[in-house]
Amino acid sequence: MTEITLSALWGDYLLPWLIRVVLALVIFYVGRIVAKWGCNLMSRQLTQHGLDDMLVRLTRNTAYFALMGLVVLAALDQLGIDTTSALAVFGAAGLAIGLAVKDSLSNFAAGVMIALFQPFKLGHYIAAAGTAGTVMEVGMFNTTLLTPDNKQVVVPNRLVYNDTIVNYSAEATRRVDMVFGIGYGDDISKARGLIESALAADERILKDPAPVVAVDELADSSVNFVVRPWVKGDDYWDVRFAMMERIKLAFDENGISIPFPQQDVHMHPVEAKAA
């Protein structure tokens, strides 16, 4: 009697349920592979048609999560779970979760706006949301920046999109703004010539537009020159550092002083009063 009962239990309940579980796992595993393959194929096609990498990645990730949602529903259906009821439950839960994670939804919407309007692209150096760095990735919820000292900064998309974005890589050229002060007793024409010679000696400085060297301010203790050469974006820091050193050395070799803040203290003797 016990053997018949166990046999019936195995044949009528356990075995069919085990088969359903195995099929559900197969659907999930195969579905995940197909979803990943389909999204990769879509990414290649979009890239071949010239779509920006940032938008391609965001589209791929969104499509992958949508397909995986369908795969999960198919696996649940194989287990015998009423997907209509599941969808209703998921819908109600989604509404509650949506209210709880409204910031995440804002981040997703901001990520879509960034991908569509492209205020910057992958590899651009930007400043936004109180930080600056090279854009490594724009995900569904966050933007990842790599700082010059090799630190990863993950910033919510909504903070990036809602802030003022300074894109240092948008244009092919940049202007290097520098200020050099000389003493009031120094020869202005001589100092100008030394600066212009230093600029002309560097091949990385563009001829068009021409560098600007002009007296900008008669300050408290110095005559200030503004020096504004144009360079390729990738040469910006190298040229700035080189010009700072080269012009300082040229001034030193030719007797041009660079004033620095100082104070003169005057001591006045006071005669002692007679007792």
Image: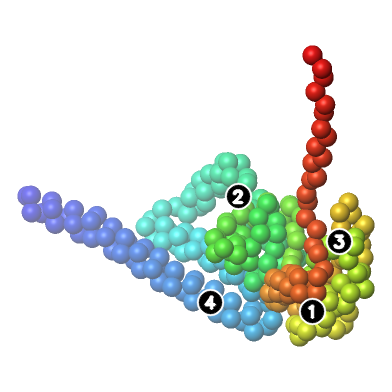
Q: Residues within 10 Å of mark 1 (few under 14, many from 20)?
A: some
| Mark 2: secondary structure | helix
- Where does label 2 land, which residue? 104
Please state which of the two labelled residues, at mark 4 or mark 1, is closer to the viewer. Answer: 1
Q: Would residue 188 be found to the left or right of residue 233 on screen?
A: right
Please indicate whether residue 77 sits to the left or right of residue 61 in the image.
left
Q: Position of residue 241 (x, y in %)?
A: 70, 71
Q: Is tag 4's residue or tag 1's residue first in the polypeptide sequence?
A: 4
Local SS, label 3? loop
Determine the residue positioned at 71% across, 71% down: 245
Q: Is 48 placed left or right of 61 in the picture? A: right
Residue at image mark 1 = 198
Amino acid type, callout 4: Asn
How far is mark 2 from mark 3, CA to CA? 57 Å
Residue sitting nearer the eye, 76 or 229: 229
Sooner in the amino-acid sequence: mark 2 or mark 1: 2
Tell which circle, 2 or 3, labels the residue nearer the N-terminal end.
2
Residue 206 makes an appearance in the image: no
Element on which disc 4 rests = helix
> Mark 2 is on which residue type?
Ser
Q: Residue 40 has which mark?
A: 4
- Dot 3 or dot 1: first in sequence order is 3
**Label whose residue precedes the other's in the sequence (2 or 4):** 4
**In the rendered image, the vertical position of residue 63 relative to residue 40, given as above or below:** above
Number of the label disc, if any, that sits on residue 183: 3
**Depth-wise, is mark 2 or mark 1 nearer the camera?**
1
Alpha carbons under labels 3 and 1: distance apart? 19 Å
Label 3 sits on what residue type? Answer: Gly
Say whether disc 4 or disc 3 marks the residue closer to the N-terminus.
Answer: 4
Relative to 195, 23 lies left or right: left
